[in-house]
Image: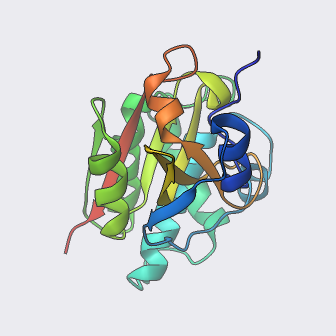
Amino acid sequence: MKKKPYGGIKDVPKYLLEKYGSEGKMIKQGPIIPMNTDSMETISGRRTRNCSVVAVARVIEYYGRKNKIVSIPADIKLIYKDVEKVARRHLYTDRFGTNPLFISRIARRTFAGYGVKIKSKGIYVWSFEEQVEKEISAGRPVIMNIARGFYRDHTVVVAGYSVWQVGEKIYPMIRVIDGWKSGYHYIDYEAFARDITQSIFGSFNTIEVQK
């Protein structure tokens, strides 16, 4: 039987029913961070391997709007152009995309260009509690890089989460903006983090604006 992909989920109860045999019940939901959910193509004006650049632009636009930072453009398309300029200095190309190791540096330097200091780091040994639940509960979106499976070689923005129970088992679901299509989708964290044939390899980049 072909395995059901861990990502791209629109209807969580339907997914749980098809994969685990029950629609389950939601026992916890974190805050939903209001972010721009346009597709990568809409934001950048072209279809290419720029998922990490778009992800950084989404986070910058969110903080600029939330904190009313006048130096950050209100138009995410203008922010994208600024991020891409910085990314190209860190080996970004349309053909190969962005090295995930450079994402935090790209974010710091783009924010610095707007006169904003941030704390950002890549996390390579991660957990749902620390890199998703804790950050989202604090109102901080997270950039998530995925190496295998449904979102192979792709970067998404984590903007919320919920926790579901099916029988005696608990299934955390990560709410993401994947950029392939507009809007929100979900990742089954249990399937992502436990099944080496589907995923497991990836990293998170946390971003926090300094006062």
Identify the image quadrant of the C terminus: bottom left
Residue 136 left/right relative to 55? left
Q: Residue drawn 44% across and 84% down?
A: 70
Residue 63 left/right relative to 137? right
Residue 48 left/right relative to 58? right
Give residue 15's quadrant in the image: top right
Which residue is most to the front?
167
Residue 115 shows in this picture: no
Residue nearest the viewer, comparing 102 with 187: 187
Q: Relative to residue 106, is residue 193 depicted above or below?
A: above
Residue 128 shows in this picture: yes
Give residue 75's quadrant in the image: bottom right
- Where residue 101 appears, as percent x and y from the top left, is 37, 29
Identify the image quadrant of the N terminus: top right
Q: Residue drawn 62% across and 34% down?
A: 6
- Where residue 173 appears, as percent x and y from the top left, is 52, 50
Q: Relative to residue 135, is residue 127 depicted above or below?
A: above
Q: Residue drawn 57% across and 53% down?
A: 176
Q: Residue drawn 48% across and 59% down?
A: 161
Numbered marks: total: 0
Coloration of the structure image: rainbow
Residue nearest the viewer, comparing 169 with 40: 169
- Where residue 66 appears, as percent x and y from the top left, is 43, 81
